[in-house]
Image (cartoon, helix red, strand yellow):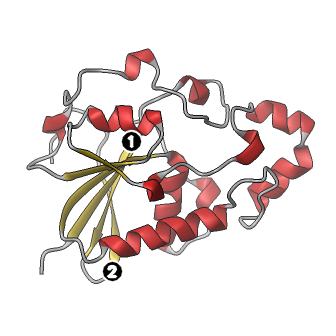
Amino acid sequence: MQSTRLTLMCHARTVAQKLARFPTDEPLERAGQSATGSRHARFKGTPRLLCGPERRARQTAELFGRDVEVVPALRDCDFGRWKGARIDDLHKSEPQMLKSWLDDPNSAPHGGESVVQLGERVAAWLTTLEATPGHIVAVTHPFVIRAALTQTLHAAAFNLIDVEPLSAIELRFNGCWRLRLMGTDLEETY
């Protein structure tokens, strides 16, 4: 039985990340953009390439190939009215709401999606991949990657996982999901 190999990759850096803002549908920072397919050699063979619908995810996925499938389940967390807001500003203007959101995974004071809802969405998507053998590369967002990790590890460590731009982790399914940490060398192939 061939296993499912899932590589989750964070999109490249955006200006919103540099400014510690909740994301909108912003593009990549200019320095993060290269020619379509310029990083295709990073993976052996031809993995199935998926990405979230946001511009930053699509632009990053295009660095790895032209045949990209946009998957709604890989969309970023819905931050509701906090989209575009600076985290420092929320510390000043809505400290209790921000604290509630950080401390309670069921909380969604911004009117968007809670961490629990995000986790349920990602868990449902992971389940659809269990019968899909082969290598899948999914370009998505830090919150989606955190949710996949916590679903895989059955842990309550969501806010303790940092996901850097262009970082990647690999999940494999062969009866159960397993986490495989990879190096950060962008020239490495595997």
Distance in Å between CA atoms under marks 2 and 1: 23 Å
**What residue would you read off at disc 2?**
176
Identify the element where label 1 is drawn.
Answer: loop
Q: Is residue 152 visible?
A: no
Between residue 91 and residue 74, name the one nearer to us.
Answer: 74
Q: The N terminus is located in which quarter?
A: bottom left
> Is 132 situated above or below 24?
below
Q: Which residue is mark 1?
A: 167
| Picture coordinates of residue 170, whole percent (x, y) | 31, 58
Q: Amino acid at mark 2?
A: Cys
Q: Relative to residue 42, is residue 34 drawn left or right?
A: right
Instruction: Residue at 43% x, 47% y: name it.
Output: 52
Quarter of the image where one finds residue 116: bottom right
- Residue 159 picture location, percent across and down: 64, 55
Question: Is the residue marked by circle 2 packed among few (<14), some (14-19), or many (20+) residues within 10 Å?
Answer: few
- Residue at the (56%, 23%) spot, across then down: 15
Query: Label 1 amino acid?
Result: Ser
